[in-house]
Image: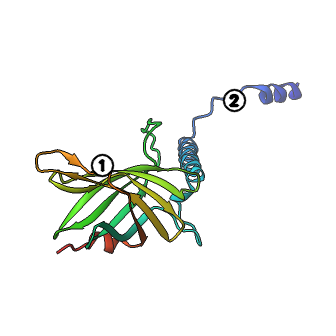
Amino acid sequence: MGNLKEIRMAVRPQGRRKPNKLRFFVLFTALIVVGVGAVYGLHWAANPWALSLPGRPALTGHWQGTVPYGPADDRRIVLRLDDDPPSATDRCGDCPGMVGVAKVCAAGRTETYELWGDARNYRGTRFSLHTRSEIEGPGPQLNELHGEWDGDLVRIRTSLTTLGADGTTTGSDSPPLTFEMTRADEDDFDGLSCG
């Protein structure tokens, strides 16, 4: 009989286990970290131009050069390009892959342009950026920037549109301008002096 009592005790269902809150929190946090890592990892795998690795710089960052607006009218330009990675709330399938800001010295003042666009190939050696000037006054303005990047040098091709005082534009069929840009840093961008 003693053996039967031992068997019944061994087969008796145990009470329901209490949930382990710490284990749930750790698993939930790990799932979020793995998910975010996968999203960003896939983004950088699809956009290698956006990630700087030892021996391989990124297209993103700061650049500087001189734009030939016309005869005896060379203007200093600095720009900052940033990667625009996807976010959890971003459902845009046609959003730009890169965004940025360009600053151009013009007659003692700084013209600022908002930039957005995409790489035209997998490695980002060709790219296009749309421009929007923050100044709506008369004068020449940069059109879309078409770039080629080879590591430490960017070659840009663009044209100028001249906005008249009456709001009319001329020169949309102007000859293309080409110029080169080299690496810069944040101090070059922030400290641009056009005086």
**Reading the chain from its start, which is encountered first: label 1 or label 2?**
2
Q: Which is closer to the viewer, label 1 or label 2?
A: 1
Place of residue 118 in the rendered image (x, y in percent of width and height, measured from the top left): 46, 49
Image spot of residue 150 (x, y percent): 54, 66
Quadrant (top left/top right/bottom left/bottom right) for the N terminus: top right
Report whether 59 appears left or right of 15. Answer: left
Task: Report the residue at 42% width, 69% height from top.
Answer: 180
Which quarter of the image is occupied by the C terminus?
Answer: bottom left
Q: Position of residue 151 (x, y in %)?
A: 53, 68
Q: Foreground residue, 107 or 135?
A: 107
**Residue where numbered disc 2 is placed:** 14
What element does badge 2 sit on? loop
**Rendered view: 67 above or below 10:** below
| Percent coordinates x, y for residue 3 in the rendering | 88, 28
Q: Amino acid at mark 1?
A: Ser
Tell me the residue at 65%/29% (across/down). 15
Front-lying residue, 90 or 189? 189
Within-10-Å neighbours for mark 2: few <14, some 14–19, many 20+:
few
Any mark on residue 172, and which? 1
- In screen coordinates, is 11 left or right of 142? right
